[in-house]
Image: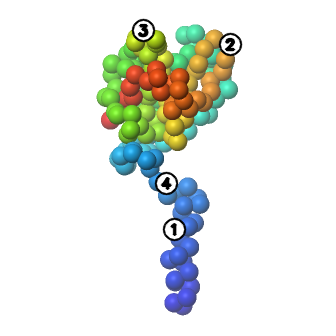
Amino acid sequence: MKASALALCCLLPLLLALSGCAQWPEPGAAAPTPVQSSVGSKVAKLAELQVGAPYLYGGDTPQGFDCSGLVEYVYGQAGLKLPRTAEGQFNETPRVDYATVQPGDILFFRSDTGSLMHVGIYIGSHWFVHAPDSGKTVSTARLDSEYWRGHFLGAGRPGG
């Protein structure tokens, strides 16, 4: 009996890790609060489900999204109401540091002149989902790429 109990104690952490129940935070990231972890994870998964949807200026449904419409729609599906515009989303979400960005956080990007121009949803491991531009589809991009890191304006955590 002791051997089977020992095997269970040794195998349980491995099984949890393989099943996705145990996750290590990204380097430099603060431990998520249980509420943020749950909501953020749901938002990130809902955002990923929209990859491939067409870009449509003013769009806020899976038939077509612009960047802020995608954010509003995904958060709405998660049960949180956000403003429709990027500016409204920026103004109504508490800021979080780049080093502590967690899945589900909203990422804000600036134009070359410094004004707010784009939003996306962080999904983890330096990736985010966004509706990039006319003629393209909702897709993923690397937050730490030269372009996006250079245009990063800030991050927000609704309800945070």
In-image side of 79 versus 62 (left or right)? left
Residue sitting nearer the eye, 160 or 26: 26
- Work out whether residue 47 can be spotted: no
Residue topped by disc 2: 135
SS at badge 1: helix
**Structural distance between the alpha carbons of marks 4 and 3:** 39 Å
Pick the residue in front: 79 or 111: 111
What residue type is disc 1 on? Pro
**In terms of sequence position, does the residue under pointer 2 or pointer 4 come before the other?**
4
Above or below, comparing residue 86 to residue 22 in the picture:
above
Whole-number angstrom distance, CA of label 3 to CA of label 2: 24 Å
- Give the residue pinned by disc 3: 113
Q: Where is mark 1, residue-wise? A: 13
Question: Quarter of the image holding residue 109?
Answer: top left
- Tell whether label 3 touches label 4 (CB within 8 Å): no
Residue 158 is drawn in which quadrant? Answer: top left
Tag count in the figure? 4
Looking at the picture, which amino acid does disc 4 mark?
A: Gln
Counting residues from the start of the chain, the first of labels 2 and 1 encountered is: 1
Separation (CA) of disc 1 from disc 3: 50 Å
- Marks 2/1 in contact by CB < 8 Å: the verdict is no
Q: Residue at x 58, y 10 (%)?
A: 57
**Residue 93, x across and y down, in percent:** 34, 26
Contact? badges 2 and 4 (CB < 8 Å): no
Q: Name the residue beneath numbered marker 4.
A: 23
**Quadrant of the frame with the C terminus:** top left
The residue depicted at 53 percent of the width and 71 percent of the height is: 12
Rendered location of residue 24, percent (x, y): 47, 54
- Kindly report the distance in space between the C-alpha atoms of the residues bearing marks 2 and 1: 46 Å
Question: Could you tell which of marks 3 and 2 lies nearer the N-terminus?
Answer: 3
